[in-house]
Image (cartoon, grey):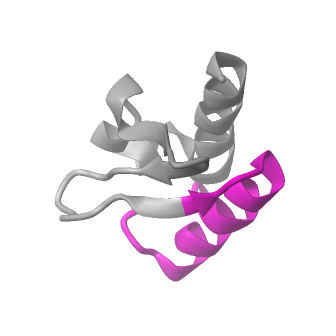
Amino acid sequence: MKDDKQKIFDLVYEIVGEGGCGEACTDGDIFQEDGEWKLFLCGFLEPWALGQTLEEVEASLREYANQGLGLGAST
């Protein structure tokens, strides 16, 4: 699980970059609950569901970044 969590952190940095990530990318903000990975961002009341597999997580992160929902895409 720790390796998968690190891969998710790496995906966040790859997709949105350090500048777009800001305070969102700390160790406590990505976690697994009931078999699903979730991302909790400052300023949001609930964590975002990312998916069960790394492929689902990547697709969700890219979709959230494209919509500008709390994650700024890197330039």
User: 13 and 9: which one is in front?
Assistant: 9
Residue 12, how many percent across, how many down?
59, 44
- Outermost residue toward the right in this view: 55
Asked if the magenta segment contains residue 58, the reply would be yes
Which span of residues is magenta-colored? Answer: 50-75
Asked if the magenta segment contains residue 19, the reply would be no
Q: Residue at x 43, y 45 (%)?
A: 21
Residue 72 seen from this side: no
- Outermost residue toward the top in this view: 2
Residue 35, how many percent across, how many down?
61, 47
User: 54 and 67: which one is in front?
Assistant: 54
Residue 14, how many percent across, how many down?
68, 42
Q: Residue at x 52, y 49 (%)?
A: 34
Residue 25 seen from this side: yes
Which quadrant: the N terminus? top right
- Direction from residue 18 to residue 47 in the image, left or right: left
Q: Residue at x 73, y 55 (%)?
A: 58
Q: Residue at x 77, y 47 (%)?
A: 54
Q: Is residue 32 above or below residue 63?
A: above
Q: Is residue 43 above or below residue 11?
A: below
